[in-house]
Image: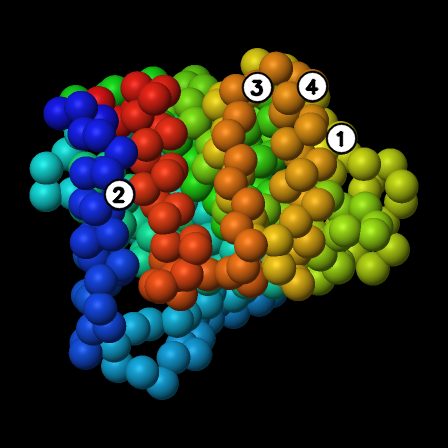
Amino acid sequence: MAGGLDRRSLVAGVLALPGLASAQTVAPPDPTETIRLWPNGAPGGQGVRVTPQVVERSTDPGFHDRYAQYTTDPILSVVRPERASGASMLLIPGGGYRWAVVDKEGLDVARVFAAAGVTCYVLRYRLPADGWAAGPDAPLQDAQRALRLIRAAAVAEGRDPAKVAVLGASAGGHLAGLLAARSDAAYAPIDAADALSHRPDLSILLYPVATMADPHVHAGSRRHLLGEAPSPDRIAAYSLERMDWTGAAPTFLLHALDDAAVPVENSLNLLAALRTASVPVEAHLFQEGGHGFGVRLIAGRPAQAWPALALAWAARHHWPQ
């Protein structure tokens, strides 16, 4: 990070960032800049008959808690810093592959990292059970395309195209893991951006859904991704701990030991796989925190430190600069 901040200064600075401060009375405005991933329509949509919706769950005017379901036109919402570093970040929120949350692991987290100088892009992705021809790879198509568009934007806007991170939470952590681990392209190229690498330069995975196998699987994510009764081969093919991580980017893992939705073994087994593949990795396990805390639910809890820990780790990998 620019300026060579020590750990104490970095932690103090991050804890004062928007989203980690005291409760607000009015929710912050949504970003006005969005990018459509597929200008001529997402691939493989001939059998899609769903109607997009965004649902608000919050009754508190101080914050939004929305989820997007039945997305047919995937977008990136751009959260720009006041003073940009050379770094960019793709944020992939969770939702169990049933929907994609908008705020808690998306815009809220993006505002924290934007305040640290990172140009952030929050992905609203398609869901695998909505009839897309690619099935479980439809969200991956969106993630690969998003990462490439962000890299192209970095070139066009004078940022470093080799400093593009991904941050994924819960099922979004699974999708971010697929993005990092898989070297194959999930769709046919449509323009010059698709000549760029779709693999991130750093990966930050928050309480990720990693395995599709019993006994530690998040059953809802598996059902919505792979169907009611996937074969053993299908389960293995989409379990992050079973993948070849050789050559993947440095990875940061974060999990709470009391996570009752996505057991911590998801991160522990993935940690072992990353170490076997000699991927530089750092892991933080908090005694308490539960699941899905993002940044809004961490005040006064051990996980309050995670954004500062992630930024300090990223700085050791020369991101941002």
Q: Position of residue 122 (x, y in %)?
A: 36, 49
Earlier sequence position, callout 4 versus callout 1: 1
Please name the residue that numbered disc 4 is placed on.
276
Residue 58 tag number: none
Earlier sequence position, callout 2 versus callout 3: 2
* Residue 35 in view in this figure: no
Nearest to viewer (mark 4 / mark 1)? 4
Q: Are marks 2 and 4 in contact (CB under 8 Å)?
A: no
Q: Amino acid at mark 2?
A: Val
Please name the residue that numbered disc 1 is placed on.
242
Q: Are marks 4 and 1 in contact (CB under 8 Å)?
A: no
Nearest to viewer (mark 2 / mark 3)? 2
Q: Are marks 2 and 3 in contact (CB under 8 Å)?
A: no
Q: Is residue 59 left or right of residue 267?
A: left
Earlier sequence position, callout 1 versus callout 2: 2
Q: Determine the CA span between mark 2 and mark 4.
A: 31 Å
Question: Residue at position x 54%, y 59% from top?
Answer: 288
Tag 2 secondary structure:
helix
Earlier sequence position, callout 1 versus callout 3: 1
Q: Amino acid at mark 4?
A: Thr
Please name the residue that numbered disc 3 is placed on.
279
Question: Residue at position x 63%, y 25% from top?
Answer: 274
Q: Position of residue 191 (x, y in %)?
A: 40, 26
Q: Determine the CA span between mark 4 and mark 1.
A: 11 Å
Q: Determine the CA span between mark 1 and mark 2.
A: 35 Å
Q: Are marks 1 and 2 in contact (CB under 8 Å)?
A: no
Earlier sequence position, callout 2 versus callout 4: 2
Please name the residue that numbered disc 2 is placed on.
11
* Classed neighbour count for the residue bearing mark 1: other residues with Cα under 10 Å, few (<14), some (14–19), many (≥20): some
Q: Determine the CA span between mark 1 and mark 3.
A: 14 Å
